[in-house]
Amino acid sequence: MRKANLIIGILILTSLSSTVSVAAPSTSTPENTGALFGGQSFDVNASEASTTNLNELPPVVEVYTATWCSNCVDVEHALDNIENETNLQQYHIHRAINEAQDPLGSIEIDQRFHDRYGISAPPVVVMNGSLMKVGSVTDYDSLETEFTEMTQSVNTFGTGNSMNGTSMFSWNSTSNTTGVASWALELENHSINTTTGVTLSAYAWIVEYSAYFGEGTNGLGDYPHVVRGIVELGEIELHSDAIVGSGSSEITLPAAYDENDLSVHLIYQFNMPAEEPEPVSPPTDTTSPEEERVPAASLLASLCVVLGAALIRRE
């Protein structure tokens, strides 16, 4: 009797062990994902301009989140705690695809995140489009420590060197729903191979400072840094010795979820060339007769449970 109970107990513990969370270290984003940099911003109701040295730009941090995601709260609070000392700029992308519990996202922005990073479940933190951490469990002494180290590892923004150049950004509000975004970029001494088909584009990211959603089950209530729209402003020329470009575009602003607290941000994004699809070979059956006779692990475990129960009844 005791022997049978011991067998069943071991099988149950084995089946439950696969659900234990394991700390996942930060990793590079998928191959052929272009880096991001930028972060200059203005309130959409103002008309302002600024010129910034590229080496003074903040780390651009994309946070994939949802109003029902309790683990996301730990991640977002950790980023808030290091925001001042690291000068990072947060952009929160809310899940929207097949989503019924979060009204703060959009299908287009969610699809962009999924296409770039191959992720569809929050929380995820991406630094400058080049380094990402999935989940909220850390091997460091705190999430703050891990995120701080991540911000220090992405200061070349994908160019291979420290940033040497300037970025100019101006915003002219023309109405409650429109404005003109102007930009100019000069970047020197990069190490990008310009013969590989890499391109660089300028985008306006429209961000809501805070959106209130009382039905959010993770308890935050006020959800900050919500990305409401992404608009392409123009493409930038890549030369072997310099990267230069400028442009001006009138854009229509997306609606805020509530209040009137939108801001417009200038983000530069490297676009990697699309890979040629590899030819698909017809499937081949490489399973040997011996392998076909070996039951799956789950089936074997189920049989063991049944046998254990039979032993209990017999005794």
Image (cartoon, helix red, strand yellow):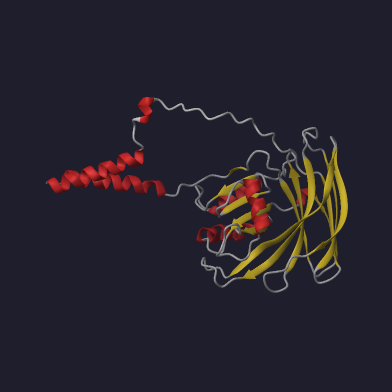
At 57% from the left and 58% from the top, the residue drawn is: 98
Foreground of the two, 202 or 229:
229
Task: Indicate left or right for 66 with 40 as reference.
Answer: left
Rendered image quadrant of residue 41: bottom right
Rendered image quadrant of residue 85: bottom right
At 52% from the left and 65% from the top, the residue drawn is: 218
| Residue 146 at x, y percent in the picture | 57, 49
Foreground of the two, 188 or 109:
109
Foreground of the two, 147 or 126:
126
Q: How many marks?
A: 0
Q: Single out the residue that lies furthest toward the front.
A: 282
At 43% from the left and 27% from the top, the residue drawn is: 287
Q: Single out the residue that lies furthest toward the left.
A: 315
Task: Indicate left or right for 77 with 167 as reference.
Answer: left
| Residue 28 at x, y percent in the picture | 62, 41
Task: Indicate left or right for 146 with 229 as reference.
Answer: left
Foreground of the two, 99 or 31:
99
| Residue 116 at x, y percent in the picture | 66, 46
At 85% from the left and 39% from the top, the residue drawn is: 242
| Residue 43 at x, y percent in the picture | 77, 67
Q: Is residue 149 above or below residue 78?
A: above
Q: Is residue 76 above or below residue 277?
A: below
